[in-house]
Image (cartoon, grey):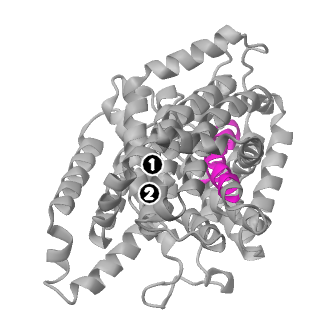
Amino acid sequence: MELMTLLLSGLQPIHLLTLVAGIGGGLLLGAMPGISPTLSVALLVPFTFHLPADTSLILLGSVYAASIAGGAISAILINVPGAPANVATTFDGYPMARAGKAQEALQVAFTSTLVGGMAGMLVLIFLAPVAAPLALAFGPAEMFWVAVLGITVLASMGTGSVVKGLFAGAFGIWISMIGISTTTGTHRFVFADFLEGGIHIVVALIGLFAIPQVLALLASDESRYQQGPRRRTPSALASVVWRTLRERIALATGTVVGVIVGIIPGAGAQVASILAYDQTRKFSRNNHAFGQGDPRGVIGSESANSAMVGPSLIPLLSLGLPGSPTCAVLLGALLIHGIFPGPHIFTTSGDVIWAFLGALLLGQVVIFFLGLLLARSGCLVTRVPNELLAAGILVLSVIGTFSIQHNVGDVIIMGWLGVLAYVGAKAGFPPAPMALGVILGPIAEGNFQMGRTIAAAGDGTLQYFTSGTLCLVLMGLCLASLAYGLLMPGRIVQSAHSDRLPVRETS
């Protein structure tokens, strides 16, 4: 009863107003390519200096959760993930939009967000003391194998050719290595001055997804997307929500993976969504439709990246360990208001933290309803002629890319990567494995180099990376995932960048 009272303290009128404003702004910021959750939260930190601590945390936390959910809007409508966490959503969400089911895909995404987000927040509220020690169990060796587990997904990401899928993934890992090594300080593959700082992950994702999409739209024989029903009744919405909730395997897989990955410091929503998408496909029957507009792909990805939000705050609040760049920004906000994370945070600042958690739990419901409102108007994008849509995507991509580091070199990199991705897709090298390589490469490399440094003072590198129960379990999962991708039928068929649109359906 006391816990319920503390949670309800976050429902004061000023808190509710802040929550709705933060979620509305977060959904819009998340839908803009290049505006990552970290950037969205960081932009608001200066505005919270003179606000009460609980109000500040509610504003920043709501923007964090909503910006991840909002990234599904652009991922589904224009095949450009609003954040790295939404990359896997493009695999099936965009084909659904091209088939005239944009509104349905958005409704599926926000329903999955509700389920995953609520589960993640409940884990944070009730299991934080139990889950915190699990975060400490993941050192560099364990994080390296987590990244390798994600990389094994590449074996099943080819368009009919495992070799091409793996080659595209290796190219993405190479892209992530360009620049000055953070471990050794050496220059790697620096062909021009603007490459010294490396290639930012968001810049790479915009280039790999947005520019090929612009070129594909301009080259398409069709003038616009397929048109779905112009009016969807409340009963149709209820039917979509009900069908989504009945996909128990996809929802459970995405939610469980998101919760586990969220607890691990440094993994992030992008790893959660990629692993959840892959596991959802492997656990589902009749998985040949994945990559061609299967709603289960959207469910797995979006439930995972939303379920990750709550548990990602467990290491931050309980141990003072920011597990992601966004959590590092939230750590700064906590310290600004005199709140010091650690085992005693619920004792020393319990009133503020419980109000914050109660508001975020309610915020999952607000995200659901505001997301459904955006789905009704957002699907109008599918009725825009291809030429205008391509121009809009290009403008947003340039603005979003430049806003990341205010560097014209990033725009040049984005353009060249886009052209390479478009030409590669024509030759059968899909962009999705490249994106996975860009995301997972730095995680694997950074933890491997850190592990080597630690192992030098012990029994050697091989012993360090192959000892321990958790390492052995992760290695077994890697082998099983790789074997499944190489031996089992039903690899993902990417159709996102095809110039040929599906045959029109009648509404």
What residue range appears in magenta?
A: 56-84
53 in the magenta segment: no
Asked whether the residues under the numbered discs 1 and 2 touch, taking CB atoms below 8 Å apart as contact, a structural biologist would say yes
Which residue in the protein does label 2 denote? 314
Residue at image point 36% right, 44% down: 156
Residue 460 lies, in percent from the top left, at 16, 83
- Above or below: residue 28 compared with residue 450: above
Q: Earlier in the sequence, mark 1 or mark 2?
A: 1
- Amino acid tagged 1: Leu
75 in the magenta segment: yes
Residue at image point 53% right, 43% down: 306
Q: Residue furthest front?
A: 2
Main structural element of the magenta stretch: helix, strand or loop? helix
Residue at image point 45% right, 37% down: 119
- Above or below: residue 87 compared with residue 266: above
Element under disc 1: helix
Residue 60 relative to residue 143: left or right = right
Residue 403 lies, in percent from the top left, at 77, 67
Which residue in the protein does label 1 denote? 124
Element under disc 2: helix
Mark 1 vs mark 2, CA separation in Å? 6 Å
- Amino acid tagged 2: Ile
Mark 1 neighbour density, 10 Å: few (under 14) some (14–19) many (20 or more): many
